[in-house]
Image (spheres, rainbow, N blue to C red):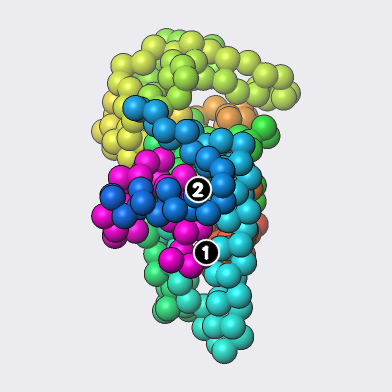
Amino acid sequence: MDKFAHMQIFVGIVEAGSISGAAERLGLAKSAVSRRLAELEERLGASLIQRTTRRLNLTDSGRAYYERSVAILADLDEADSAVSQAHGSLKGGLKVALPLSFGLLHLAPLIQEFMTHHPEVRFDLDFNDRQIDLMQEGFDLAIRIATLEDSSLIARRLAPIRHILCASPGYLAQHGAPGTAADLARHVCLAYSNVRDPGLWTYRGPVGLPGSVRVPVRLAASSGEFLMRAAIANEGLLLLPTFYVHQALCAGQLVPVLTDHTWPELSAYAVYPPTRHLSSRVRVFIDFLVERLAGEPYWDRME
């Protein structure tokens, strides 16, 4: 077996986290993958992986060999892509992790447009709000909504993700609108549960001073779309990113509340591991997203 094949199998083992996982990804028998690893270590004269009953751990030699192997395989892939692109086509696969709701609502149409422009690019999409380990699970990139100041990933900002406090006209007619953030403690509130403290809402007041208020949470859920529907049904005040609720706001089903306050802002990023070279496919796809999402996000325009 040639050196490149050994490299591919070794990288597959590291990124899958197990020999069996690599075998499944590569379409090989587990015994074959294990044998190829043994052959590679014998050829190199070094142990690359420490095997335990629970997991595989890279040795120092294994970590160095993995990083070089990823770079070499990426260069080979890039060479193929460059030739294909020079002849007018972008080819190959992209494995991308996306947040569920943001991905379905706002990224899916862009991905479909990209596929129209590049019909020979294949996508493997994981719409999921869980934290993906890009390297271990073999993803080319992920779209994440977060703060990444201290991230080990290489990131490119795509768009701001702003929050808005809103309620239905029916709820406000029945309960009145809060005049200050402190008034929220006397209202019925709906909270997104995939945060550290769903009942603690932070803000900056009219003159820019930071503050927080503990709100009574009648309903907490991990689905922003479910919470939006509950708010439309007059169930309470809702604090969510604008990308969830902009259509309901434009339709008058929800109305902004405490508009002189600023609520938390995150960002959407395209991220990829520093151990991976940026292939033509990944670079062109990220450039495409940056171009399409440039400027003020359409979901922040109440038109």
Q: Rate crowding at label 2 as few (under 14), some (14 to 19) or many (20 or more) other CA atoms within 10 Å.
A: some
The answer to whether residue 191 shows anywhere in this view is yes
Sooner in the amino-acid sequence: mark 2 or mark 1? 1
Vertical placement of residue 272 versus 76, above or below = above
What segment carries the magenta color?
A: 1-29
Q: Label 2 sits on what residue type? A: Glu
Identity of the amino acid at label 1?
Lys
Q: Is residue 105 left or right of residue 163?
A: left
Count of numbered labels shown in the rendering: 2
Instruction: Check if residue 11 falls in the magenta segment.
Output: yes
Say which element carries label 1: helix
Q: Quadrant of residue 216?
A: top left
Question: Mostly what secondary structure, the magenta segment?
Answer: helix
> Horizontally, is 7 left or right of 277 in the view?
left
In the image, residue 284 above or below residue 95: below
Which mark, by number, is residue 41?
2
Task: Please name the residue that numbered disc 1 is placed on.
Answer: 3
